[in-house]
Image (tube, rainbow, N blue to C red):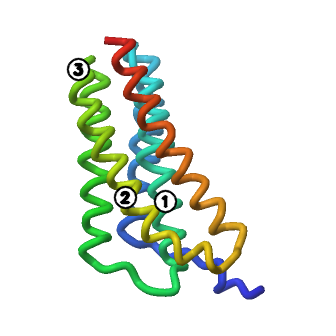
Amino acid sequence: MTASRYRVDVDPHTAAGSAFVIIGGLVAAVAGPLDLTKGSWLAAYLVLVCGVALIVIGAAQQHLTTAIRARTRVWQLAGWGVANALVIVGSLASVPLVTDAGSVLLFATLAVTAWTAWPLLRTRRTAAFVYVAVLIVLAVSVPIGSVLAHARA
């Protein structure tokens, strides 16, 4: 196994994901001192869902045998950003319908992302299966998050 086999470059997905992790860390740093009611939720969401998941997607897609079309990558990033913005705004404002709209868009974005991931499974590498497992966990958590948003409203 060579080191280049596991190389991950900075691409729009990993760069945006890294930015979300940093923003989430900053939110976590100020949530307590500013007594932000939903600050810990926001920090965790920014770091885990917006950031780490996007980094995993970007890193995994760098190892596909065929490149993803530019239009698909733009759809993934735009869908990811808008969907998560809607979920965050809807959750912070306690407006479940906005959260639901973001959840639907996030689920669609995950579906497109999963569709592009299938060639990775043919490699039979553990990392490919972990990647698909991450996408499945995210997809399962989308409706759970929507139900919780309705329960809190």
Sort mark 2 into few (<14), some (14-19) or many (20+) by Cα contacts within 10 Å.
many
Q: How many marks?
A: 3
**Quick check: marks 1 and 2 in contact, CB under 8 Å?**
no
Q: Position of residue 128 (x, y in %)?
A: 63, 68
Q: Position of residue 153 (x, y in %)?
A: 31, 12
User: What residue did someone put label 3 on?
Assistant: 95
Q: CA distance from mark 1 to mark 2?
A: 8 Å
What amino acid is found at the position of numbered circle 1 in the picture? Ile
Q: CA distance from mark 2 to mark 3?
A: 26 Å
Q: Nearer the viewer, residue 11 or 68?
A: 68
Sort mark 1 into few (<14), some (14-19) or many (20+) by Cα contacts within 10 Å.
many
User: What residue did someone put label 1 on?
Assistant: 55
What amino acid is found at the position of numbered circle 2 in the picture? Ala
Residue 112 to residue 138: above or below? below
Q: Earlier in the sequence, mark 1 or mark 2?
A: 2
Q: Is residue 115 left or right of residue 130?
A: left
The residue shown at (49%, 77%) is 62
Q: Nearer the viewer, residue 38 or 94?
A: 94
What amino acid is found at the position of numbered circle 3 in the picture? Val
- The quadrant holding residue 97 is top left
Q: Is residue 128 left or right of residue 20?
A: right
Residue 41 to residue 105: above or below? above
Q: Is residue 141 left or right of residue 36?
A: right
